[in-house]
Image: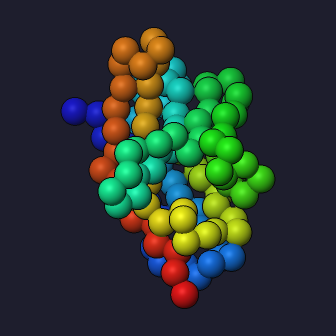
Amino acid sequence: QVQLVESGGGLVQPGGSLRLSCAAPGSIFSVYKMGWYRQAPGKQRELAADITTGGGRNYADSVKGRFTISRDNAKNTMYLQMNSLKPEDTAVYYCHASRLNGALFHWGQGTQVTVSS
């Protein structure tokens, strides 16, 4: 059982910032593309951002310019810096690791992000 461990969620006011972290085993982190998905109540899970082992980044249009994904290969940890948060960013955020075009994948347990005044 591969463990992806998320942290950093919480309650923040609109316009505020949060940083999510996802720690993974080194055997996974070094060869898997890593990403953050999110699922709002009553909606499908969607990709927020992902990052390849080489550092290539991809963002959903809804978060471009506000969220930054990064990875620290020495710490086997991925981050999602979320700025200018909006109420519509409220969701459970899941860490995801994948390779072989998604044939192999793992999920974290999720961390709640709530943006509300």
Quadrant location, the N terminus: top left
Rendering coords of residue 91 (x, y %):
43, 61
Residue 10 visible: yes
| Depth order, front residue of 24/14 | 14
Rendering coords of residue 16 (x, y %):
65, 76
- Residue 13 against residue 62 in the figure, above or below: below
Q: Residue at x 30, y 50 (%)?
A: 109
- Residue 17 against residue 89 in the figure, above or below: below
- Residue 98 against residue 4 in the figure, above or below: above
| Depth order, front residue of 115/35 | 115
Q: Residue at x 65, y 58 (%)?
A: 81
Of all residues, the one furthest to the bottom in this rendering is 117
Rendering coords of residue 73 (x, y %):
60, 36
Rendering coords of residue 27 (x, y %):
42, 25
Q: Quadrant of residue 84?
A: bottom right
Residue 95 visible: no
Q: How is the image coloured?
A: rainbow
Judge from the rendering whether residue 46 lies leftward or rightward of residue 63; answer left or right.
Answer: left
Q: Quadrant of residue 56?
A: top right
Q: Residue at x 64, y 61 (%)?
A: 82
Quadrant location, the C terminus: bottom right
Of all residues, the one furthest to the left in this rendering is 1
Q: Residue at x 58, y 36 (%)?
A: 50
